[in-house]
Image (cartoon, rainbow, N blue to C red):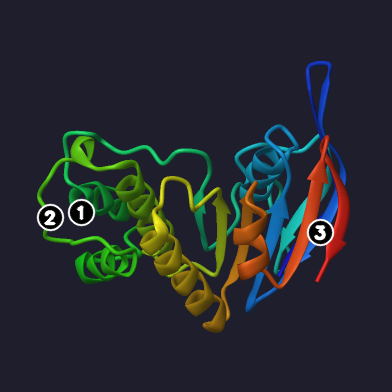
Amino acid sequence: MIDVNGVSLTIGTSRILRDVSLTAGPGEIVGLIGRNGSGKTMLLRCIAGLVRPTAGTVTADGIVVGRDRDFLPSSGIIIETPGFISYYSGMRNLMLLAGIRGKAGREEVREAVRLAGLDPDDRRPVRKYSLGMRQRLGIAQAVMEDPEYLLLDEPMNGLDGEGLTDMRELFISLKNKGKTLLIASHSREDIEILCDRVYEMDKGRISGEKA
């Protein structure tokens, strides 16, 4: 369970987030929808532990992010455009990332690449990937260590019709395995198709919630 309680964020003289509270539980896809600049991405950064809120707490299974742990435990994350080493293949990029914590071996990484709709034996460098292929690789990176929590910022960016269908099926399969997914998007269609609950954001606040 992710529990965001009264999170606010001020940077300089700008109030980015204002008393945001929400929950996301196991086996649930929770959506954040709002226009660009509404605070969705910065909220995900706070939940991930990449940014410390000015006030409020983010708790995951009793662990306070930023106090008990620096980062959200057991998490897979895409925030903004995924970045990779352009002259390495997708598989080599992911193997380098997997080596940091050692939680995923070659077979787990290959399976994640396949789940994301890519060929793990494709030797092309990432610089030759289309935008949709880069997005798929970012999703493979997020799921390869079998995390309990997935924070996905605009995960459908650059995907064609087939890619949208593939990713929707993947996210639903992860939900059915008991994972907790928090997805931010400006696309109401993506959110309404996938999500069990939706929080609407505007000017750094939760402006509404619906099941």
Density class for disc 2 (Cα within 10 Å; few <14, some 14-19, many ≥20) is few
Residue 69 seen? no
Marks 3/2: CA–CA distance:
40 Å
Q: Secondary structure at mark 1?
A: helix
Figure check: 193 above or below 142: below
| Lateral position of residue 156 relative to residue 89, left or right | right
Q: Which percent across, then down, holds residue 177?
A: 52, 82
CB within 8 Å, label 3 to label 1 = no
Measured from the top left, where is residue 27 in percent x and y? 63, 79
Q: Amino acid at mark 1?
A: Met
Image quarter of residue 203: top right
Which label sits on residue 122? Answer: 2
Alpha carbon separation for disc pair 2 and 1: 8 Å
Task: Evaluate whether residue 155 shows in this view.
Answer: yes
Q: Quadrant of the C terminus?
A: bottom right
Q: Amino acid at mark 2?
A: Asp
Q: Going 69% across and 60% down the picture, which residue do you hit?
A: 31
Residue 147 in the figure: left or right of residue 41: left
Dot 3 surroundings within 10 Å: few (below 14), some, or many (20 or more)?
some
Q: Position of residue 85 (x, y in %)?
A: 25, 35
